[in-house]
Amino acid sequence: MSDKADKYRELVVLSIVPGAVGILTLASWVLAHWQVGPYFVNAGLAIFATLFGGWLRLLAGFKDIFRRKITVNVFVAVALIATLAIGEFRAAAVIVFIMAAAGALESYTLDKTRRSIRKLLDLAPKTATVRRNGEEVVVSVNEIAVGDIAVVRPGGRIPVDGVVAAGHSSVNQAPITGESIPVEKFTGSEVFGGTLNETGRLEVRAVKVGKDTTLARIVHLVEQAQGTKAPIQTLADRFTAWFLPMVLVLAAIAYLGSGDIKVAVSVLLVACPCAFAIATPTAVTAGISNMARRSVLIKGGIFLELARKLDVLLVDKTGTFTFGRPRVAGVVAFDGLLEQDVLRLAAVAEKYSEHPLARSIMARATEWGLRVADPDHFVVEVGMGVTAQLDGQQILVGKDKFLRDKGVSITAAIYSEISAQSERGRTPVLVAADAKPVGLIAIADEIRAETPHAIAALKGMGIKNITMLTGDNYTVAQAVAAEIGVDDFRAELLPEQKLQFVEKLQAEGKVVGMIGDGINDAPALALADVGIAMGAAGTDVAVETADVTLMNDDLSRVVNFMEMSRKVLFRIKLNIFFSMFYNVIGFILAGFGLLTPVLAVVFQEIGCLTVVLSSTLLLWAKTGASLQGSGRDSLGVVLLPVEKNAADRVSQCA
């Protein structure tokens, strides 16, 4: 409840400036419209609203001038001053109101992103069971010291980085390392805080606690990466650098030629940054809205611009190219047996096991409609395999060493099959009945059906350098890369190493995109020029850290996003052409004294309308159907996109 109260309190605080400006502007209009009170009262309210809400924008414009930088801030400052100079006080107040509202929304979005980083720490339990003086006591995780023994039961999260002192279990390390299959942990194994203990009871000796844990370091990396992401100069700022000086020169020439200050003001007003300033935001907003209907959420227009410039696209494997869960990839039967007989024997042995690989075998048996009998007896040897009895028949399921230790003879042909499956990135599980090998079950992380097609489409769009990053071993990474058509990959990476790889590429001057879904991807997502999160299955922090979110986990939506970035950039350039066209015509008319200040404002309003209509066409632009054809295009919600630095660039037709 307190989180909700804080959220509403923040919205109220951020709404104070735009709310006050809006009320003052409305009051000024009411007094002027009904001629209530003297003129200086309604004019004073509009001027006060302009200065109250726009002084920071004016100050930023003057600071940019002193820094010898000509930006949209400078242009907006000039427009506000010119508008006030000719007595259009309420028009200036309306422009300030729009900018203040955009700034408030931007601040709220950025604050929300910063808060989401702290949610990473929610993975670490608040309390832990610790063995002290021969007893198990529950303490706050802040009270755990290096050397303490933490007891972690099945289904619990490990509170510290440490070493297993006793017990054995399967631990899901995907949030930290990105490994797709839970890892077996025994006495002496290293474990990470925040990872999930799935099956057995563990006693963990604390090695790193608090801020020293891997999870805490990831939080720090995310914050650091977000803080060091370099700002990108916008297309609008680059254009303004030479456009505004030209306008000022033309206004001076008009004044010198006519001797009439109104002619000079008309030149300034006809070049008001309204149409130019909305050339980018309107196209971006339409593009973002279009993508939202396709289940792609984009946090700002700058990422549409950057997407067109990507030199390298980095993609996490687990949960992005793959589903991040083990599935039976194939069944190999020996000596003429049927595949379903091999699978049935394995399912009988694994029926009561809680191991993730056992669950994948049972899932495939269910898919095949097999009837799986209850074993008469079964024994699990953690990390090796399981022994079961059914109607006097002994069934063994597990690693080759496990079967050899039980007296099963494994031939060279079987070893060849094991090697072949391993080279394909699969985990081979042998099945034996009455000391005779009967088959092999290959288990692997399932590749998303649309992945190969999406990779091919991205390459066709000019993104040649697509690199897969994963915490999995080299063999698995190589097999997956070959299957999906990725030419380059990096295996066995920790979060720090993914971040370092992004830093290395950026240091070489490359524009880097990153697609990921897990907490282990968050630092790299934050630092990359364009971070794309697989939203539905991705962690909250990955979604909040990233710049683009695929809500339905359809990788082909990345292709849609890239196509839309090209369309939006083309539309922005077209809009700027329209604004320049009206400016040129307006300059000529105003320079010859054919436009009064009022007509100059009307003329530039026509330019605004043209730009808006041009951008609106993007709402219906097509970027191709989903490669998978999921049909989940509509979110059923209305989204208000907020562009980074929107307050600096968004103006409005007054």
Image (cartoon, rainbow, N blue to C red):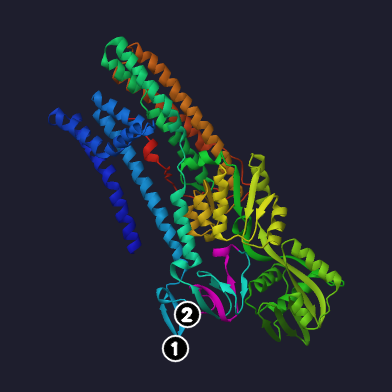
Q: Could you tell whether 558 is left or right of 111 in the image?
A: right
Residue 628 in picture, x, y percent from top left:
64, 50
Checking the image for residue 179, the label placed there is none
| Image vertical order of residue 277 relative to residue 560, above or below | above
**Residue placed under numbered mark 1 in the picture:** 133
Q: What amino acid type is highlighted by mark number 2?
A: Asp
10 Å crowding of disc 1: few (<14), some (14-19), many (20+): few
**Residue placed under numbered mark 2 in the picture:** 148
Q: Quadrant of residue 431?
A: bottom right
Residue 574 in picture, x, y percent from top left:
50, 27
The residue tagged with tag 2: helix, strand or loop? loop
Residue 481 in picture, x, y percent from top left:
69, 54
Q: Which is nearer the eye, 58 or 102? A: 58
Residue at image coords 47%, 38%: 284
Q: Which is nearer the eye, 214 or 12? A: 214
Q: Could you tell whether 98 is left or right of 355 in the image?
A: left
- Magenta stretch encompasses residue 158: yes
Where are the magenta residues, as a range?
Answer: 149-178
Q: Quadrant of residue 352?
A: bottom right
Q: Quadrant of the C terminus?
A: top left
| Image vertical order of residue 597 relative to residue 241, above or below | above
Q: What amino acid type is highlighted by mark number 1?
A: Asn
